[in-house]
Image (cartoon, rainbow, N blue to C red):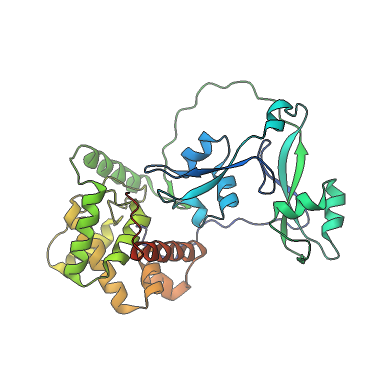
Amino acid sequence: MLTRGDGTMRNVVRVLTGIAVPLLTAGVITAGSPGFGAYKVKDGDTLSRIANRYGTTVKNLVVLNSLPGSGNVIYAGEVLKVPGRTSAATKHPARNSQLGRVTYLVQPGDTVSKIAKRYKVSQASLLAANGLRASDHIYAGKPLQVPVKVRPRAKPPAKPPAKPKKNNSFAGRTYPDHVVAKADRNRAILKSRKLPTRAQMRTLIVNTSKRYGVDPELALAISWQESGWKQRVVSPANAVGAMQVIPSTGQFSSSIVGRDLDLLRPQDNVTAGVVLLDRLTGAARLDIAIAGYYQGLGGVRRNGMYPDTKLYVKNVLRIKAQLERGWDPLR
């Protein structure tokens, strides 16, 4: 859990007007292309693992499946569209060019036919790449994905393997070395311990929520979004355990329950997260309370929800609704 009460903005991607910027490398199959298959997400899958399996990128899978939050939440049993190879593509592989895409910002006076002609692509493929119908309008400033043929780049000479860098980044933010060092220590401690299974963590969350009068499905949804009910998870921000509680939040919750909570202990960790949820839901409506768990309630009230916070709230509400309908992510 990343309680961001300091109001720090996350990285913003700037769009350059009037130019086409290559986004996807050669070999990507666009949403309007044939050769797609379906993949049912299994327990323990991640989007990067699925992307590697099918020879594509996380970004492409996010676009193909309209996944929220850059694909940071997928569910066991969920069916994803994945790129595959058609028989024609297998028999006659392109040698001198491959399929890629560029992003073009629509200019005043542009039409689909003009843009298609400019890039020497069919209107049908341009519409399909952007999920548009022939009757849809485009407007100045709208980014369009244009499927184009690109020449494969020559492979650079092999370099000796670089020394791996320490990962100080998480969710678009970079953390000081001392924070990451503490996270590494906590991760090592948890790795050496025998911890509850995810099913046992679910039971722990439900029982603790009932004890403090918190909606169990809300607490379960928060924890699933944060850690997948895994007590062993520690982020570079030193958010610990099944409800991803950072030390300052642990101290806050400790002051409420009247004893020191050890975030490395499953029961104390869940108690810290549930107590925080109890305070948040008592102080604000549901969506603001969920945003406060992620961004910090003070930060939400001062600055409103950041774009990534809005996605977080949407994901949690979606998970909560599925749990209320009987969805079991561990099945």
When asked about the image quadrant of residue 221, the answer is: bottom left
Out of 253 and 50, give the one closest to the viewer.
50
Q: Could you say which is closer to the camera, residue 72 or residue 197? A: 197
The residue at the point 58 percent across, 38 percent down is 56
> In the displayed structure, does residue 292 sit left or right of residue 94?
left
Q: Position of residue 13 (x, y in %)?
A: 60, 55
Q: Quadrant of residue 54?
A: top right
Residue 329: give x, y in percent of width and height.
35, 52
What is the quadrant of residue 43 in the picture? top left
- 13 to the left or right of 248: right
Q: Position of residue 40 (x, y in %)?
A: 46, 44
User: In the depicted view, which residue is nearer to us: 299 or 74?
Assistant: 74
Among all residues in the image, which is located at the extreme left? 259
Identity of the residue drawn at 71% across and 51% down:
129
Against 52, is 5 above or below?
Answer: below
Describe residue 254's horizontal placement relative to residue 43 as left or right: left
Vertical arrangement, residue 285 with respect to residue 291, above or below: below
Residue found 25% across the figure and 71% down from its top: 278
Q: Is residue 70 visible?
A: yes
Q: Is residue 119 left or right of residue 44?
A: right
Question: Residue 305, relative to residue 51: is it above or below?
Answer: below
- Of residues 167 and 109, the one drawn nearer to the viewer in this rendering: 109
Quadrant location, the N terminus: bottom left
